[in-house]
Amino acid sequence: MPYTGFTLHHTCSHLDLFPVLTMPGWSCLVTGAGGFLGQRIIWMLVQEKELQEVRALDKVFRPETREEFSKLQTKAKVTVLEGDILDAQYLRRACQGISVVIHTAAVIDVAGVVPRQTILDVNLKVSFIHELMETNAEIHRETLGRVQKTLLKIGRKNRTQNLLEACVQASVSAFVFCSSVDVAGPNSYKKVVLNGHEEQNHESKWPNPYPYSKKMAEKAVLAANGSILKNGGTLHTCALRPMYIYGERSPFISNIIIMALKNKGILSVTGKFSIANPVYVGNVAWAHILAVRGLRDPKKSPNIQGQFYYISDDTPPQSYDDLNYTLSKEWGLRLNSSWSLPLPLLYWLAFLLETVSFLLSPVYRYRPLFNCHLVTLTNSIFTFSYKKAQRDLGYEPLVSWEEAKQKTSQWIGTLVEQHGETQDTKSQ
């Protein structure tokens, strides 16, 4: 029977002297481990065979998350690390003795709330790649050439991500990057993409910080595939592009429900013109586990290295508004039935507000309620197939739509109860 793995707590961003395992088997570092997706990955990861240690890294962990990790039934050691992903030295130390990195840490903001530089720092933190030469120029020459060539094309001359540098220094052999469907678009609400796939090479053209930073980070990760590690080994990388992720503890759904409860149970209408294929958080976590297995499997790895994969599941294509309603209607919540602006007019209003924001920027920071990117993102027909992930990774959704819907709805019920604004009765 498995036993509960003990947890080490590190709460500073300096070079803590936590132990490096030298036992047979493998170990994994998960960044963003305290987040919505990161926690699910940890829960699944600890059940993997021959896993010796999981390092869960995030800037801050909620007390309840720490407690959940400490109670995990696993033979692997679970080490909780609180540290800043922008601290290059801390990252290098965190990567020592690690076999695999799953990188999920990111600032997700499409509304313009978070300052642009903050998003770029976290999602695309860069430093001079010449630092790699200080240790062993001969080993890194091939790595530098490959990455620099790609980064020149994308306008980041002689730079790469801190975490990739740390992996090269620590001889981490596999790197799985949690990207986003936002790196593919949509670029226009007028363009329809139904059941899209990887070979179509969709790419976001938006300069907004979130899609831009995720796109550039993904390019850097895939460019690093085949890099020569400090120990002479080879780094293998891949990226996963999940659709909009829903499920229990979703911060986006939580905000939507709380806002509705404050508005007499009326859900805001923001994406009724869209058709998307949302994906359940448990299925996204499962795809990351399969990507790790694939990169570690000598037979499967050659087909996965340097590739990206769209991750969806069997959730029916629907608008974002319909999804929110379907998940919450059991608790008496309902969509706003009042008149709304036609989509073309809404887009041009967003453009006007962005123009005003730009003109005021020298003297005042005005944040529009919505922007062109947000209007396009939430009102486009934009769905993708998971067939490539099915073929290469062996991906099949673990959780059905009915089960995902039930679990998410039950969790929404707890939100309704917690905020003391339960509707008269559950709808029949």
Image (cartoon, grey):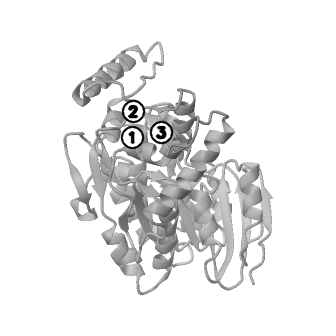
Helix, strand or loop at disc 2? loop
Q: Amino acid at mark 1?
A: Asp
Helix, strand or loop at disc 3? loop
Q: Quadrant of the N terminus?
A: bottom right
Q: CA distance from mark 1 to mark 2?
A: 6 Å
Closer-to-camera residue (372/52): 372
Mark 2 Cα within 10 Å, few/some/many (few <14, many 20+)? some
Mark in the foreground, 2 or 3: 2
Mark 3 Cα within 10 Å, few/some/many (few <14, many 20+)? some
Q: Amino acid at mark 2?
A: Val
Closer-to-camera residue (179/243): 243
Q: Position of residue 382 (x, y in %)?
A: 28, 50
Label drawn at residue 269? 2
Q: Earlier in the sequence, mark 2 or mark 3?
A: 3
Q: CA distance from mark 2 to mark 3?
A: 19 Å
Helix, strand or loop at disc 1? helix
Closer-to-camera residue (354/235): 354
Q: Residue at the spot x=36%, y=74% of the render? A: 390
Q: CA distance from mark 3 to mark 1?
A: 19 Å
Q: Amino acid at mark 3?
A: Asp
Q: Residue at the spot x=40%, y=78% of the render? A: 394
Left or right of residue 351: residue 22: right
Q: Position of residue 286 (x, y in %)?
A: 50, 68
Q: Residue at the spot x=72%, y=48% of the render? A: 62
Task: Provide the residue designation for mark 1.
Answer: 321
Q: Are marks 1 and 2 in contact (CB under 8 Å)?
A: yes
Q: Residue at the spot x=29%, y=21% of the render? A: 349
Left or right of residue 125: residue 277: left
Task: Provide the residue designation for mark 3.
Answer: 109
Q: Are marks 3 and 1 in contact (CB under 8 Å)?
A: no
